[in-house]
Amino acid sequence: ETVHAWILAAVNGHTDQAPKDKRTCVRVLYSRDKGQDYHVDLAIYGMKSNVAYLAEKGKASWPESDPKAFIDWFETHIKNKGDQLRRIVCYLKALSDYNQKQAPMLNGISITIISVEQLVVSDKDDKSLVETVKRISQQIKTSKQIKKPVTPYENLIQGWSEDEISKLCKRLDI
């Protein structure tokens, strides 16, 4: 909480909107013309003996979490599956941002992981997006998990209620 407070204080006043202190990051909010908003999430890491630890609010200690390993994992999949994967992740993150206020949506890291796992490659992005979303919905319905592929390997939707999962899948069902 102390480190989060330091980051909040450091970024406060740099935009028209107050930053948000979230569980794993500090979110700096920006506004563009015509009411379109965007944000930057500042995750807070510490290094000890070449191991990365995340400053997560509400935890007694900083859990091990390796952002570089995650980026490497994703870039490997981009090389293997093609740049369409990156575009599908961007489309789904934009959809999530747009729908966040209306119903439960996945966060960015969850979208990235499940898109890698369920990508349907197509000659057209719209076809790929539709088929990938269908597969994402099916995976969430059946497994009720999105496992992080690097340390700490947690289920990123653990703790979601059946109702939240159902609402998410209804929004995804095409």
Image (cartoon, grey):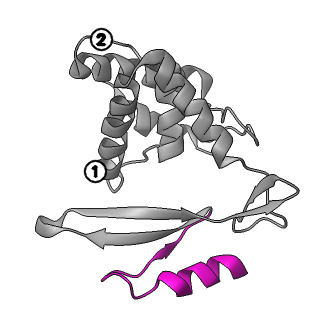
The structure residue drawn at horizontal position 47% and vertical position 43%, both measured from the top left corner, is 106
Q: Which amino acid does label 2 sit on?
A: Ser
Q: Which of marks 2 and 1 is nearer the N terminus?
A: 1
Determine if the magenta segment contains residue 155: no
Is residue 1 shown to the viewer in this render? no
Of the 4 image quadrants, the one containing the N terminus is: bottom right
Q: Quadrant of residue 167?
A: top left
Marks 2 and 1 in Cβ contact (< 8 Å): no
Instruction: Reply above or below: 92 against 117.
Output: below
Secondary structure at numbered mark 2: loop
Q: Which is in the foreground here, disc 2 or disc 1?
A: 2
Kindly identify which residue carries mark 2: 122
Left or right: 132, with 62 as reference point: left
The spot of residue 108 in percent (x, y) is 47, 45
Left or right: 98, with 72 as reference point: left
The spot of residue 4 in percent (x, y) is 64, 76
Is residue 30 shown to the viewer in this render? yes
CA distance separating discs 2 and 1: 25 Å
The structure residue drawn at horizontal position 46% and vertical position 27%, both measured from the top left corner, is 115
Kindly identify which residue carries mark 1: 98
Q: Give the range drawn in magenta.
A: 1-23
The spot of residue 146 in percent (x, y) is 60, 32
Left or right: 10, with 171 as reference point: right
The structure residue drawn at horizontal position 82% and vertical position 52%, both measured from the top left corner, is 51
Q: How many marks?
A: 2
Task: Name the outermost residue toward the right.
Answer: 49
Secondary structure at numbered mark 1: helix
Of the 4 image quadrants, the one containing the C terminus is: top left
The structure residue drawn at horizontal position 84% and vertical position 67%, both measured from the top left corner, is 60
Determine if the magenta segment contains residue 2: yes
